Structures are given as structure tokens and as C-alpha cells.
């Protein structure tokens, strides 16, 4: 399903409306976030500061004259916006592509609200796991994590790229392991079990992390919220 740029722009414009002047916001990556940066730049007398785990987003913010803060100096974010590969009605989300999920979760934990901006093709009743759960792991733990992931029903494959010899390395200097699951009966338990494996730094499965999702379609825009007591920050 091809989603038009107009839908993504409408989603970004809706997100802009809830950003307060002089606030600190977190921004992930993707085309909707790029539109949001453009709208922030165009809004008159509007000044915000940005924290981002994405190198591409950081460069785009700087190019557009936005103030980008060093994450290590920030302990609180007002709002954070991000995309994902898929999000379900419980606001569980899977982010498989960028390999920056460890930093994304850090920024999410610092934010009062962590909001996913998605088109309706990515919103499902329950996560389908058509894409892998990505584990950022210590190099020394590779064989051990592979074994443990298999015992959990996963099919682990070390991430590689045609553009690089050897395994893909994260921005943090760690290996990335893609783990495919055919069926997941309990998403929360899977996340807990993966996090419990020694050598796993973090996973790209976001459980009890997102507080809201803005889902954009051809004819409507809908907000989904999770009760505050269910969100673990």
C-alpha cells in the first residue's frame, strides 16, 4: 500500500498543533518527522529545542536552523515523536529498520509523552511480526544470544549489509541481530524474556513505551491514547 505524501504532511501538521513554544521535543526519523521539522521551521516566533537519536534528523534540524541539544545533557523532554514499522491497539510497537532503538527508548523514557506518528497501513489490532525484532547485543554474547533467542522460538540472523564487509554495527558500536518470530502469543512476555538475556542491550520491541499514537488515513486522523497507569517510564 502506497501512502501519499499529503497524508504524512497532514499527520505532521496535526502533531505540530500540540507542541508548545519553548519546549524540548524528541524527534525520531522518517518522512513524517521530516515534514514536522519543516513545519516547525515555518511557524513564526516559534522556538523549540530538539533531542534526537537519528543522525539524519539531527542534520536536517541543523540545516533548518533548529536548536539541537546533546542528549547526554538532557534529563527531561516535553514531547517525543517517532515512527515505527507497526503499532497495535495496545500501543505495542515494532521498529526494525534503523537499528537505533536503544537510543529511541532512552528518549521515550525521558519524555512526558512518546507519540508514534503512523499511517493507517501500520496500525493493526495486534502486532503481526512480519518484520524481525532487532536486538542490539554485545559482540562477545553473539552465540549465546542466538541460542537463547532460538529457545524462545525465534530465528536469529546477524544483520549484514552489502555496503559493508562483516556484520552491521550500531551507532553505539554493538552488533545487531534480527530475530524472526512466526507466532507470538504474549508480546509483553516476549519483550521481558528477550531483555533478560545477558548480552542483550535492548530490543526494537516497544512494550508499555508509547503513550499515544496519531494514525493518519485518506479521510481521517485519529488519536489513540494509553491510560497513564499502564505506561512504564
Image (spheres, grey):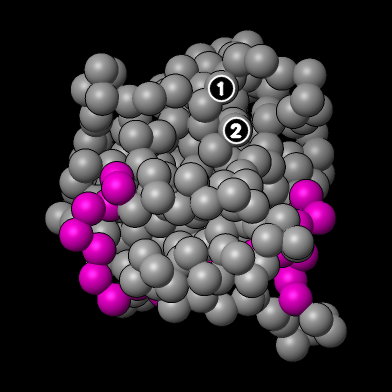
Q: Which residue, given by chain and number where applicable, does mark 2 sit on? A: 106
Q: Secondary structure at mark 1?
A: helix
Residue, disc 1: 110
Question: Dot 1, crowdedness within 10 Å: few (<14), some or many (≥20)?
Answer: some
On the question of residue 4 being in view, the answer is no
Q: Quadrant of residue 5?
A: bottom left
Image position, residue 218 (x, y; %): 23, 59
The residue shown at (25%, 17%) is 229
Residue stretch in magenta: 167-189
Quadrant location of the C terminus in the rendered image: top left
Q: Are marks 1 and 2 in contact (CB under 8 Å)?
A: yes
In percent of width and height, residue 198 lies at 59, 49
Q: Is residue 178 magenta?
A: yes
Instruction: Work out whether 8 lies above or below 66.
Output: below
In the rendered image, the residue lying farthest to the left is 125
Q: CA distance from mark 1 to mark 2?
A: 7 Å
Residue at 49% across / 46% down in the picture?
195
> Vertical placement of 184 versus 188: above or below?
below
Question: In the rendered view, does 55 fall on the left or right side of 212?
Answer: right
The label shown at residue 208 is none
Amino acid at each position: 500500500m502506497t501512502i501519499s505524501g499529503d497524508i504524512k504532511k497532514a499527520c505532521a501538521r496535526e502533531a505540530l498543533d500540540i507542541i508548545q513554544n519553548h519546549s524540548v521535543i524528541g524527534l525520531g526519523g522518517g518522512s513524517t518527522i521530516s515534514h514536522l521539522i519543516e513545519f516547525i521551521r515555518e511557524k513564526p516566533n516559534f522556538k523549540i529545542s530538539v533531542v534526537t537519536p537519528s543522525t539524519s534528523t539531527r542534520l536536517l534540524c541543523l540545516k533548518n536552523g533548529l536548536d539541537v541539544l546533546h542528549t547526554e545533557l538532557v534529563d527531561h523532554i516535553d514531547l517525543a515523536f517517532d515512527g515505527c514499522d507497526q503499532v497495535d491497539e495496545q500501543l505495542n510497537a515494532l521498529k526494525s529498520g534503523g537499528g537505533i532503538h536503544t537510543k529511541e527508548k532512552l528518549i521515550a523514557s525521558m519524555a512526558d509523552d512518546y507519540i508514534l506518528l503512523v499511517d493507517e497501513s501500520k496500525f493493526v489490532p495486534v502486532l503481526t511480526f512480519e518484520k524481525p525484532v532487532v536486538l542490539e547485543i554485545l559482540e562477545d554474547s553473539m552465540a549465546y544470544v542466538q541460542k537463547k533467542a532460538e529457545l524462545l522460538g525465534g530465528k536469529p540472523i546477524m544483520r549484514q549489509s552489502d555496503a559493508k564487509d562483516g556484520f552491521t554495527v550500531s551507532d553505539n558500536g554493538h552488533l545487531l541481530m534480527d530475530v524472526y518470530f512466526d507466532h507470538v502469543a504474549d508480546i509483553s512476555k516476549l519483550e521481558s524474556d528477550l531483555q533478560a538475556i545477558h548480552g542483550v542491550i535492548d530490543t526494537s520491541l516497544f512494550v508499555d513505551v508509547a503513550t499515544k499514537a496519531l494514525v493518519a488515513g485518506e479521510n481521517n486522523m485519529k488519536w489513540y491514547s494509553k491510560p497513564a497507569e499502564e505506561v512504564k517510564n
